[in-house]
Image (cartoon, rainbow, N blue to C red):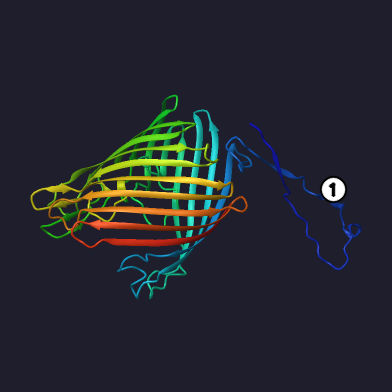
Amino acid sequence: MLRGTIFLPLAVMAVTGADVRAADLPWDAPAQVEPVSYVQICDQYGAGYFVLPGTDTCLRVSGRVRADVQFMNFGSAPSNWSERDENDVRFRARGYVYLDAFTETEFGLLRAYSETTFTSDSDTVRDADTSSDTVVELETAYIQWGGLTVGRTQSFFDFFTGATYGSVARNLSDDKVWVAAYTGSLGGPLSFSIAAEDISERVNGTFDAVTTTDGAGGNRWPAGVVALRAAQSWGTAQVSAAVQEARPLSAAAQSEVGLAFGAGVLFNLPMLAEGDALALQVQYAEAALSYIGATDVFDSYYDGTRTRKTTGWAVSGGFTHYFTPTIRADFDASYADVDTPRGAPDQDYRRYALDMDVAWTPVQGLEFGVDVGYANKNPDNEKVSEEASAILRAQRTF
């Protein structure tokens, strides 16, 4: 392990007065200066890590400040653009604090990681008075020890979660959840993960046609997730599956089993430019539609006799290209097809979404970018709805 040093004086002497000289002091100043102390640098985990004094732990403290101006939905009415009681422009300031700690133990490498955000948004509703409120969120916080991961992190089902700023939502699985997982090697480039995951943010609920109630019942079991991964110099590939309970809020409706499957591949394309990459994936879900990014439809429908499942599939992908080392473009696209049970209040629909950004990094850690997105949703027996949005962003990572 290579280590360097950062000079950190532990004491600073401040003297005030019109004319104070060393000879005027009642003691020998040089002899009283505290010895300097040093903080050790540990670089085996990357740049920016230092040894916490008195411990064997390497810590990195980093952060990010992001300022966005978003032109909200200016697509087909009703939208932010057409409604008088909604603001079309949203301003956002967000700060990030990242803590990453590594410790070597006799049983393997121990890691703890957390990401906390502080967000202040302008109001999207005209008469609201929350623009001065700051929302603090613990985005990620987990412990890894050997192959064990416990805490809040990205779902092990997820693969490609988007390359752009995301002016409009794409139909793909992208959720941070509470997990308890084990990851092991199968030899060579292959690895596997098996996880138990919280489903609180994964359920869309059931509609009961008899009582006209809707919603999801309380969780009784976590979701079970398995994933198989391959990683080599050309890129990565993954197949994954999830199973969870679709439990209605209404006691009259029976619970169903929600299922999801996904497969994806990401290609590194250094032959085009350093940092270029292409990702493609397909995902299928029944009674668990959040796994294809469809959160606007019930997972199931109780018709008075049985609970019937909503099903859907989605394909999505993204591409990143660097025109120069400081200018890049990102592109995302997705298409989803959702099939609801006969008699359900939700309509079958098809939806496609396109999103693109262009970013400029004039100096390391500083980025300016613009993102535009468009989505089109086509229900079976309703009017087509269109969504359009744009983001202007300035971001400093340090």
Q: Nearer the viewer, residue 192 or 375?
A: 375
Q: Nearer the viewer, residue 272 or 226?
A: 272
- Rendered location of residue 302, percent (x, y): 13, 52
Locate the N terminus by quadrant: top right
- Rendered location of residue 113, percent (x, y): 49, 44
Q: Residue at x 31, y 66 (%)?
A: 76
In the image, farthest residue toward the right: 23
How packed mark 1 is, by other alpha carbons closer than 10 Å (few <14, some 14-19, many 20 or more), is: few
Q: Could you say which quadrant of the image residue 315 lies in?
A: top left
Q: Residue at x 25, y 57 (%)?
A: 378
- Rendered location of residue 28, percent (x, y): 87, 52
User: Does residue 105 lie above or below 309 as drawn?
Assistant: above
The amino acid at mark 1 is Ala
Which element type, helix, strand or loop, lies under badge 1? helix
Q: Is residue 49 left or right of residue 226?
A: right
Q: Could you say which quadrant of the image residue 5 lies in?
A: top right
Q: Nearer the viewer, residue 61 or 302?
A: 302
User: Does residue 271 lie above or below 135 as drawn?
Assistant: above
Q: Residue at x 45, y 64 (%)?
A: 70
- Residue where numbered disc 1 is placed: 31
In the image, farthest residue toward the left: 305
In the image, farthest residue toward the top: 187
Q: Is residue 369 left or right of residue 318?
A: right
Q: Residue at x 39, y 73 (%)?
A: 128
